Amino acid sequence: MPKVYLDNAATTAVRPEVVATMTEVLQNEYGNPSSTHNIGQSSKAILEQCRKDIAKMFKAHPGEIIFTSGGTEADNLVLRAAVRDLNTQVLITSPIEHHAVLHTAEALAQEYNITLELVDIDIQGAVDLAHLEALLEQYQGQKVLVSLMHVNNEIGVILPLKRVADLCKTFGALLHSDTVQSIGHYPIDFSEIPLDFAAVAAHKFHGPKG
């Protein structure tokens, strides 16, 4: 009996050409990319080419691409680095963010005694941009990170990412967006949207998990 799969919003099947390429690399390119010998450098070349291909896809710079184990780690990495290394004093997010962001923000607020603000949302789950602007104005002059997902994984509401990015730029705030749910399905040009950080996961568009 044929399978019917209707859960692509959660994860997707890996495309055959992806499996074939990964299998070939796993079998033949086993060197440590940090090693200076030929086998290691061959692995490094493949890794760096992947970085360039991904950057080209999203109109980003290869040096801006960081590989992690998945979306959850990527979100954690950004929020924790912003507080620990960039001395962020205020985190602004929404009450319906993915738990990878919301729970991390709550933990950081307690751990580092920083301010956590939850922007209002309307009855449909859309971010209240007027309230966001008011919060940004309130904390202007402090180090602020806004973290809002592009497409909500539960209800599908789409954030006007360019408008939010422009607001953050106006008030000097950093912007992080979990784009895991939209990447591969919704056009995003990082050269046109002044995002500081974005989390992406290949398993949402027929790549491997992670």
Image (tube, helix red, strand yellow):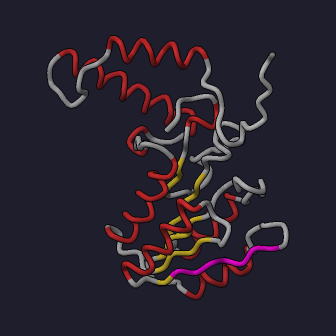
Which segment is the magenta one? Answer: 116-122
Relative vertical location of residue 7 with respect to residue 20 in this rendering, above or below: below
Relative vertical location of residue 115 with respect to residue 9 in this rendering, above or below: below
| Residue 195 drawn at (x, y percent) | 55, 57
Asked if the magenta segment contains residue 194, the reply would be no
Residue sitting farthest toward the bottom: 138
Q: Quadrant of residue 150?
A: bottom right
Relative vertical location of residue 111 with respect to residue 205 in this rendering, above or below: below
Viewed as shown, does residue 26 lie left or right of 120? Answer: left
Residue sitting farthest toward the front: 1
Q: Residue at x 50, y 71 (%)?
A: 105
Viewed as shown, does residue 27 lie left or right of 192? Answer: left
Residue 184 vs residue 156, the one in the foreground: 156
Residue 162 vs residue 22, the one in the foreground: 22
Relative vertical location of residue 133 with respect to residue 18 in this rendering, above or below: below
Q: Residue at x 41, y 75 (%)?
A: 88
Q: Residue at x 48, y 79 (%)?
A: 90
| Residue 119 drawn at (x, y percent) | 66, 77
Residue 102 vs residue 59, the one in the foreground: 102
Q: Quadrant of residue 16?
A: top right
